[in-house]
Image (cartoon, rainbow, N blue to C red):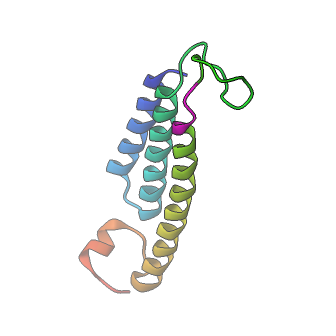
Amino acid sequence: MNPILSFIVILVGLYGLSTSKNIIKSVFSVTIIEAGTILLFLNLGVYEGGLIPILEAVGINMVDPLPQALMITTIVIGSTITSLALMLCIKIFHHFGSIEWKVIMKGDRS
């Protein structure tokens, strides 16, 4: 996979974040940015002709397993943060009666 595609995914998330008027769309845009960053790190951590470190004997052509381990941790933490942000969206909706950024920034309570 090409790292340029990872940058495209990150840019799609940034576009969604900058144009969203809804908090839930903003949360999902941040999740898309996170997925693009994970793809970028995984693309940079692999090279052509590299062997799988678990199945092959120890050698010089092994792919480093550290980026994959870090990205698995990032996926778990990211899903937790996304669920927490969606829970906060529910609390904001109960407090303000809306999940639109303009209504919340004005501070009007319905």
Q: Write down the region rendered in magenta.
A: 63-67
Furthest-top residue in this view:
49
Name the residue rendered at 52%, 74% in the picture: 87
Q: Which quadrant holds the C terminus?
A: bottom left
Question: Residue 50 placed where, x, y %?
Answer: 60, 18
Name the residue rendered at 32%, 73% in the picture: 103
- Where residue 51 sits, quadrant-wise, is top right
Furthest-left residue in this view:
106
Name the residue rendered at 55%, 22% in the picture: 1
For the residue pair 3 and 108, the one nearer the viewer reads as 3
Q: Is residue 40 above or below residue 4?
A: below
Q: Is residue 36 left or right of residue 102?
A: right
Furthest-front residue in this view:
58
Name the residue rendered at 27%, 80% in the picture: 107
Question: Residue 97 placed where, x, y %?
Answer: 43, 81
- Where residue 95 sits, quadrant-wise, is bottom left
Question: Residue 100 placed where, x, y %?
Answer: 38, 67
Question: Residue 52 placed where, x, y %?
Answer: 67, 26
- Whether the magenta-drawn stretch holds residue 5 is answered as no
